[in-house]
Image (cartoon, grey):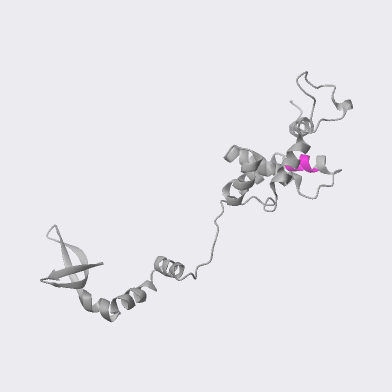
Amino acid sequence: MFIRTQTNGSRTYLLLVENERVDGRLVQRVLHRFGRLDELRASGQLDALVQSLGRFAEKIVVLDAHAKGETILTQTVTTGPGLIFDRLWRECGIQAVLEAELATRRFAFDVERAIFLTVVHRLMAPGSDRAAERWKEDYALAGTETLGLHQLYRAMRWLGAALPDAEQTAATPFGPRTRKDRIEEALFARRRDLFN
């Protein structure tokens, strides 16, 4: 069903029609004649008809409300990566190892969540910490909503801090052992079993 016009001489009429197949051909059947287009416009009946029909069409209602300035601003966020990687993060023991490493520290923000954010960001859309802070606005990552760029920088600095001299015995000649190395070793130790 759709609306079309029909012109007879100098007059244009508004029609409600539908297509139907008759003997293998497509034929338009007139369901209703609304009247002359110029008269419908002048009387305001055309606008009233469209507005009346619009009540039953969800998209039209939204567009009409937007035109009147009555819509509310919304934001959509992607939930998939947060759900999947959060579960993997916990099942691999990364959250527990980080929390154990952080137990003696008193940060004013959740360092484990800041590291989680940067890791998921690098998996999904590799980039800097600055890019991660902007990227998180479009993704639902539990516990990262209030993290700022300076907190991501502090979390990365904490991860890259050199370990005390007593723990530098296995350091390579290229650089000192860092907290990241100790975390990796703790994760490996969690996965060890009788055969490895």
Looking at the rendered image, the quarter that the N terminus falls into is bottom left
Can you tell which quarter of the image residue 166 is in?
A: top right
Residue 34 visible from this viewpoint: no
Query: Can you name the residue that lies furthest to the right here?
Result: 166
Could you say where residue 174 lies in the image, as x and y percent from the top left?
A: 75, 20
Name the residue at the left extreme: 9
Query: In the rendered structure, does residue 97 fall within the stretch colored magenta?
Result: yes
Segment colored magenta: 95-99
Against 157, residue 42 (above or below) is: below
Q: Closer to the camera, 102 or 126?
A: 126
- Identity of the residue furthest to the top in this view: 173
Residue drawn at x 74%, y 44% as measured from the top left? 112
Q: Quadrant of the C terminus?
A: top right
* Image-based side of 12 in relation to 84, left or right: left
Q: Quadrant of residue 35?
A: bottom left
Which residue is located at x 69 percent, y 53 percent? 146
What x and y, as percent, mark residue 116? 69, 43
Q: What secondary structure is the magenta-colored segment mainly?
A: helix
Determine if residue 109 is in view: yes
